[in-house]
Image: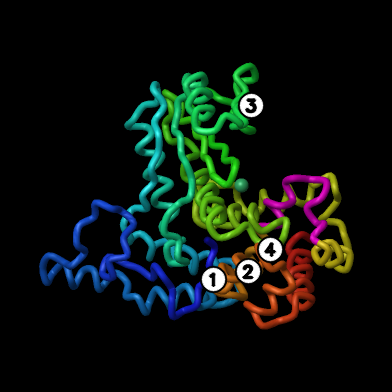
Amino acid sequence: MPKLLKLSIAACTVILLSGCSISPDSTNSTPASPEASEEAIVELTQEQITELITSLPEGKTLEALKAHYIAIDEAAKQLEPFEIEYTLGPTADPARVEKVVNQFSEKLKMYQFLGLESLNQDWVLASEKDYQWWVDFRSAQDPSFPVEMWNEEKNELGHCRLRADIFCGAGNTLNGKNYQNNVVGTAFTNRGIDYVSRHEAAHFYQAVFGYGGRCWMAEGQATFFETYLESSSRYRDEIISELRASKTDVAKLSESELLGLLTSDQICQGDSNIAYNLGMLGYEYLYMNFSFLDVHNLQVLSSTEGWDEAVSKVLGIEASELNAALAAYIFAETR
Ligand SMILES: [Zn+2]
């Protein structure tokens, strides 16, 4: 169940030392020797991690913003790998699949600081040749499973064209269960997996805690982390260029028109890329002005109680004030 985190209950605020491990086969985390103990303490203390997730970047610049989130991601590396259980397709290459799963495990770690303990998802990792097996497997789990999401004729899974050298993923929810359907091609070489797993990890976190009360939040957050934490991702400039080129002319709106559409949450209409591109700018503003933990709490609460209520409860300001600040920021960054 989604939960708000207050400092006192920062559930998985961490670490090797606190034994807040996800992996069931991890052994007792007590350091084996004085040297190991010193090493672990040098990594980051619980106080330092609490400080990281409750503080703002050191300055309202994109550089400081990036440095802050790199620091959070780096701090998360000391955590145990995030455990992901999965069913392997009959012709999927276990070694390739393991590499992919390890990437996801790494990218999910930072959300443990926000209380993520497990993924409520049923994963399949198949190869591009496992279509019939996958149909049978999912249909046996739930006869109403929308197996058309893998289109054999078009050779597509979700929006992704299947080939031997790709990784594709498509999630869906059915009768209260979350499914993640992945294809790891039989000749996959990890190309693109860094930013894809970074992006998808944000959605897995959101699946547990909530996608946020605005149309741009889910994709915006995923795009933000992809852009800020993965060098293989699209550059910020490219994202803004794409936003400027939107057929909706969203980047040509006046500031007050922008504010109107943000306030009514109609800003994503007419172009599905707006949620990603404008959403990234929205998250830049949020993460520059509020902590990782505050934005998490905003996201959780706005998913259930609505944006206006969540903004005032979590951030202590009126939604109109935040909407205006977001509009001003997005307006300025897209000129
Ligand atoms: Zn996405």
Q: Judging from the image, what secondary structure is the residue with disc 2 in?
A: helix
Marking on residue 282: 4
Pair 3/4: label in front = 3
Marking on residue 148: 3
- Mark 4 nearby-residue class (10 Å; few <14, some 14–19, many ≥20): many
Q: CA distance from mark 2 to mark 3?
A: 34 Å
In the drawing, does residue 23 fall left or right of residue 139?
Answer: left
Pair 4/2: label in front = 2
Q: Judging from the image, what secondary structure is the residue with disc 1 in?
A: loop
Q: Which residue is mark 2?
A: 301
Q: Earlier in the sequence, mark 1 or mark 3?
A: 1
Pointers 1 and 2 in contact (C-beta within 8 Å): yes
In magenta stretch: residue 248: no
In the drawing, does residue 35 fall left or right of residue 102?
Answer: left
Q: Outermost residue toward the bottom?
A: 316
Pointers 2 and 3 in contact (C-beta within 8 Å): no
**Type of the residue with mark 4:** Gly
